[in-house]
Image: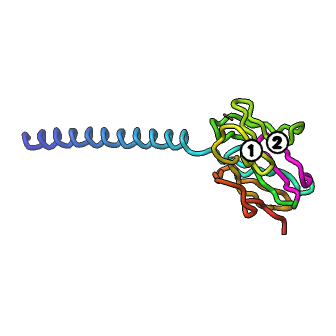
Amino acid sequence: MTHTKTQQKVSRREFLGWMWGASLVGLFGQTAVGLFQFFKPRTEAGAFGGQIVAGAPDEFKPGTVSHIRQGRFFISRLEDGGVLALWQRCTHLGCTVPWREDEGQFHCPCHSSLFNVKGEVTGGPAPRPLDIFPVSLKDGKLVVDTSHPTTREKFEASQAFYLK
Ligand code: FES
């Protein structure tokens, strides 16, 4: 009889311990999922951080700069037809840099950094050219991958995307 009681106590204790362990595992699991959801990068199609369809190449005439607002970048179509996707973020302290059609350049409103159509610094405190995003052609449209900004020290022809 005594033996049975001891056995019962032990198994009850074991059961409670087991339940305690299981609830801890559940709690940590839920916390881990919540943290992952919070920190995972936003990569939905069509939103900044993902793939953005900028438009058909014909929509961007050589020598023009077009703002793609939802992607936070500019399509700069160079005179030779090359395409650059320039991030609108100033490389000085991160302000949004507008393209000034009247000046023919990017002009940061914060501390007056200036950038040309290739994103190169032509004045002000910015330490390097505007960052660029990879460009590709999918289903006849220019697609910009805003999940991978590339920093650069200077413009090189290989940075531009060319239609074959
Ligand atoms: S943030 Fe653009 S010049 Fe300072």
Q: Which residues are magenta?
A: 59-79
Q: Quadrant of the C terminus?
A: bottom right
Magenta stretch: includes residue 61: yes
The colouring scheme, among rainbow, by chain, secondary structure or one colour, is rainbow
Q: Residue at x 85, y 45 (%)?
A: 66
Tell whether label 2 touches label 1 (CB within 8 Å): yes
Q: Secondary structure at mark 2?
A: strand
Q: Which residue occupies the extreme front position in the image?
A: 123
Residue type, label 1: Thr
Residue linked to disc 1:
122
Q: Earlier in the sequence, mark 1 or mark 2?
A: 2
Residue 162: % across, % down: 81, 64
Instruction: Report how far apart the C-alphas of labels 1 and 2 lie in the structure.
Output: 9 Å
Residue type, label 2: Gln
Magenta stretch: includes residue 75: yes
Q: Residue 136 is drawn in which quadrant?
A: bottom right
Residue 63: % across, % down: 89, 52
Residue 99: % across, % down: 82, 39
Q: Which residue occupies the extreme top position in the image?
A: 110
Q: Residue at x 84, y 37 (%)?
A: 100
Q: Quadrant of the N terminus?
A: top left
Q: Residue at x 70, y 53 (%)?
A: 133
Q: Residue 103 is drawn in which quadrant?
A: top right
Quarter holding ligand 1: top right
Residue 27: % across, % down: 40, 38
Residue linked to disc 2:
105
Q: Residues within 10 Å of mark 1 (few under 14, many from 20)?
A: some
